[in-house]
Image: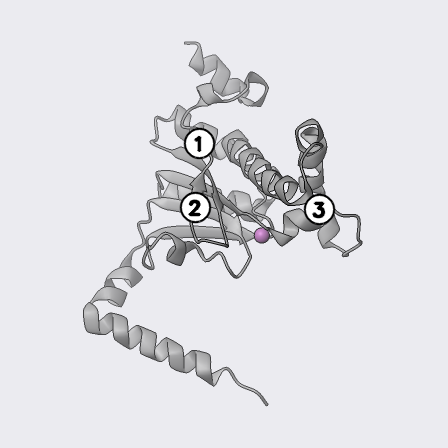
Amino acid sequence: MSTLANLLEQNRRWAEGIKAQDPTFFQTLAAQQAPKYLWIGCSDSRVPANQIVGLKPGEVFVHRNVANIVVHTDFNCLSVIQFAVEILKVEHVMVVGHYGCGGVSAAMESHELGLIDNWLRHIKDIYSKYEWQLAGLDEDRKLDRLCELNVIEQVRNVCHTTIVQQAWRNGQNLTVHGWVYSLEDGRIRDLGVDMDGETDLEPIYRTAVGTAEGTS
Ligand code: CO
């Protein structure tokens, strides 16, 4: 039987190291978490949220799935957003894609991969929407651009949720950001698509209540 003794040993050393620096670290954290950030990123093992932005345990709430997709009816992702925005009152949501994303790359091809093809359909929809912009690019640049466009579309999807719109309507300080991480140099590129209020949304996506109150 193989065990994960090496990981458990690493964990023991890690916990002891932290306690040596700050003896009350774990007790304080166990009592309460108050992160200011929600990270929605790819499951890719090379893109670990906390490490990339230098945040400690307790400082970032995280949701990851294949290709950082925010689907309107995905109750897993929506529940994370609701808890983060309404209970934890995070001030920033970052949708973080990465160049060379295997999920985005697979969506550009026609090989059958199984169940995940249904998930990747969402990226094919984005490809189809922006085909006019992608058509002239070489394959590498096309993949990079689709990774960026995917982030931009998912930022919109976050903003279109009733949760985020309600938060804005209640005057909550909340900004949604779109970032892309480069595996090659470890740097994050800000796509400059920040949204921090309902006026940033196309009217069709604003909720009816929001529109009525927005005009009063
Ligand atoms: Co990925």
Rendered view: 101 above or below 25: above
Q: CA distance from mark 1 to mark 3?
A: 25 Å
Give the camera-side residue of 71 and 49.
49
Displayed quadrant of residue 205: top right
Query: Which type of secondary structure does the marked residue at label 2 adopt?
Result: strand
Q: Which residue is mark 3?
A: 107
Query: Is residue 23 visible from the viewing direction of this image?
Result: no
Residue 43: x percent and y percent?
Answer: 55, 56
Q: CA distance from mark 2 to mark 1?
A: 12 Å
Q: Which residue is mark 1?
A: 192
Query: Is residue 140 visible from the viewing direction of this image?
Result: yes
Query: Which type of secondary structure does the marked residue at label 1 adopt?
Result: loop
Total marks shown come to 3
Rendered view: 123 above or below 204: below
Q: Earlier in the sequence, mark 1 or mark 3?
A: 3
**Mark 1 CB lies closer than 8 A to ligand 1:** no
Q: Which mark is residue 188?
A: 2
Residue 26: x percent and y percent?
Answer: 27, 66
**Mark 2 CB lies closer than 8 A to ligand 1:** no
Q: Which image quadrant: the C terminus?
A: top left
Displayed quadrant of residue 146: top right
The amino acid sitting under disc 3 is: Ala
Which residue is at a point 74% across and 55% down the rendered structure image?
A: 115
Bin the neighbour count of mark 2 within 10 Å (Cα to Cα): few under 14, some 14-19, many 20 and up: some
